[in-house]
């Protein structure tokens, strides 16, 4: 069953932008920011949750604080001529799920097969991971210099602060 389409007004977009910046914000705090009452904000947020638009709330972990200062994005492409013990994607997903340094990954379509975000305490640890990953396919890694949460695209042309532009 797919999610149904939901039409949002400018206030809904401002609420979503606020929640993306601070998912722990109270309905009162959000209401103050978007000029609505706490109950009105609560109703809108519950409606977006029930519709499946808001899929969850997560803690974002800062790898540097854990001593994992080598933060990378890895591009991955399967070897086209290699036989795998099962469906290639399933085999790689098992490997990635077993690696505690992997932050998240995306199965994608196009020139690459996966994008993998991971963080390591040392370059040596990164090299071991990449060597293990190369057993499955082609790997290219990129050091992440800065990670930012950008504004979510608003089809009405409103920015995260509710201003146009």
Image (cartoon, grey):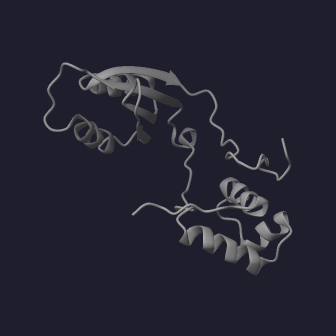
Q: Position of residue 29 (x, y in %)?
A: 78, 68
In depth, the one of 99 and 57 nearer the eye is 57
Left/right of residue 15 with respect to residue 5 in the rendered view: right
In-front residue for pair 78/117: 78
Counting every numbered tag in the picture gives: 0
| Left or right: 65 in relation to 14 | left
Pick the residue in front: 159 or 61.
159
Residue 26 placed where, x, y %? 71, 71
Give the residue drawn at x 24%, y 41%: 90
Quarter-of-image position of residue 59 = bottom right
| Quadrant placement of the N terminus | bottom left
For the point 27% across and 36% down, the residue is 92
Residue 118 image offset from top left, x and y in percent: 45, 35
Relative to 63, does residue 83 appear above or below in the rendering? Answer: above
In which image quadrant can residue 115 be found? top left
Q: Is residue 52 left or right of residue 42?
A: left
| Outermost residue to the bottom | 39
Q: Position of residue 19 (x, y in %)?
A: 68, 59
Examine the rendered structure and indicate whether residue 12 appears above or below residue 70.
below
Question: In what quadrant of the picture does the C terminus appear?
Answer: top right
Look at 70% across and 65% down and name the residue there.
Answer: 25
Q: Is residue 24 above or below residue 140?
A: below
Residue at point 44% right, 27% down? 74
């Amino acid at each position: 069953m797919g999610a149904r389409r939901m039409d949002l007004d400018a206030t809904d977009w401002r609420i979503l932008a606020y929640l993306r910046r601070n998912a722990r914000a109270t309905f009162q705090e959000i209401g103050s920011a978007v000029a609505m009452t706490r109950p009105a904000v609560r109703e809108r947020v519950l409606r977006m949750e029930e519709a499946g638009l808001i899929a969850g709330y997560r803690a974002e972990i800062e790898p540097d604080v854990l001593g994992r200062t080598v933060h990378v994005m890895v591009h991955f492409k399967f070897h086209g001529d290699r036989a795998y013990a099962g469906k290639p994607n399933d085999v790689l997903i098992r490997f990635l799920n077993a690696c505690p340094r992997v932050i998240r990954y995306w199965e994608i379509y196009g020139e690459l097969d996966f994008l993998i975000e991971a963080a390591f305490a040392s370059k040596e640890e990164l090299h071991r991971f990449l060597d293990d990953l190369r057993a499955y396919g082609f790997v290219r890694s990129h050091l992440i210099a800065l990670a930012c949460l950008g504004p979510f695209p608003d089809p009405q042309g409103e920015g995260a602060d509710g201003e146009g532009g």
